[in-house]
Amino acid sequence: FKVEDCIRDDSKEAVAQLTQAGLSVHILSGDNPAIVSSTASQVGILSENTYFSLSPEMKSQEVSKHTNTLMIGDGANDAIVLSEADVGVAVLGAMDISLRAAEVYLTTPGLNPVVTLLTLSKETMKVIRRNLFLSLSYNSLSVAAAFMGLISPLVAAIIMPLSSLTV
């Protein structure tokens, strides 16, 4: 008998999309070199970004060497590194300890939800920055107009909470 894990259908596409977005994709695994190298080559991860035979502590040390890290994991041995990463993502079927260690829990199987997560987070940050700019501009104009006597302080005080509503 031969028993092995299956690679999800969307893995190669997701890795390609993440790489195309300028991200560096790595595998940190406790498995043996042959399995990890085979998996990496099947999904399109560079051999220099492939780490094998790692203990949970070694995974954590490797992640701490980098900035702006996102770690995806599902096992008890991933709990430490999920909490060490800037963003820890537990996937469907993850063990309870991984769920507690991660900031994000994906309820949809596969890696495409990770691509969606990153896309949505970038769009959310764009909206936040735009709204912050609008709010600062709106409030600055109101304060300047009040100081110059163009509007009364009462009108400026009413405008400020309205700016929060519009943003």
Image: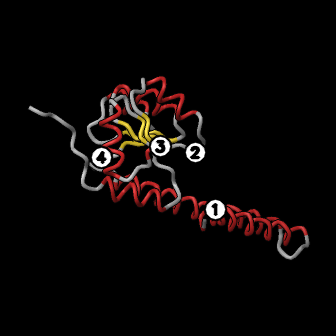
Residue at the limit of the structure toward the left, as seen here:
1
Q: Residues within 10 Å of mark 1 (few under 14, many from 20)?
A: few
| Image coords of residue 27 (percent x, y) | 41, 40
Amino acid type at mark 1: Arg
Q: Which quarter of the rendered picture does the C terminus lie within?
A: bottom right
Q: Are marks 2 and 1 in contact (CB under 8 Å)?
A: no
Left or right of 72, for residue 164: right
Question: Marks 4 and 1, Cα distance to the nearest angstrom?
Answer: 28 Å
Q: Nearer the viewer, mark 3 or mark 1?
A: 3
Q: Position of residue 46 (x, y in %)?
A: 44, 49
Residue density around tag 2, few if under 14, some if 14–19, many if 20 or more, within 10 Å: few
Residue drawn at (35%, 33%) of the image: 33
Badge 3 amino acid: Asn
Please state which of residues 38 and 166 is positioned toward the viewer in this rendering.
38
Tell me the CA gap for discs 2 and 1.
19 Å
Quadrant for residue 104, please give it: top left
Cα gap from disc 2 to disc 4, whole angstroms: 23 Å
Residue underneath mark 1: 129
Q: Which residue is mark 2?
A: 68
N-terminal label among 2 and 1:
2
Residue 107: which numbered mark, if any? 4
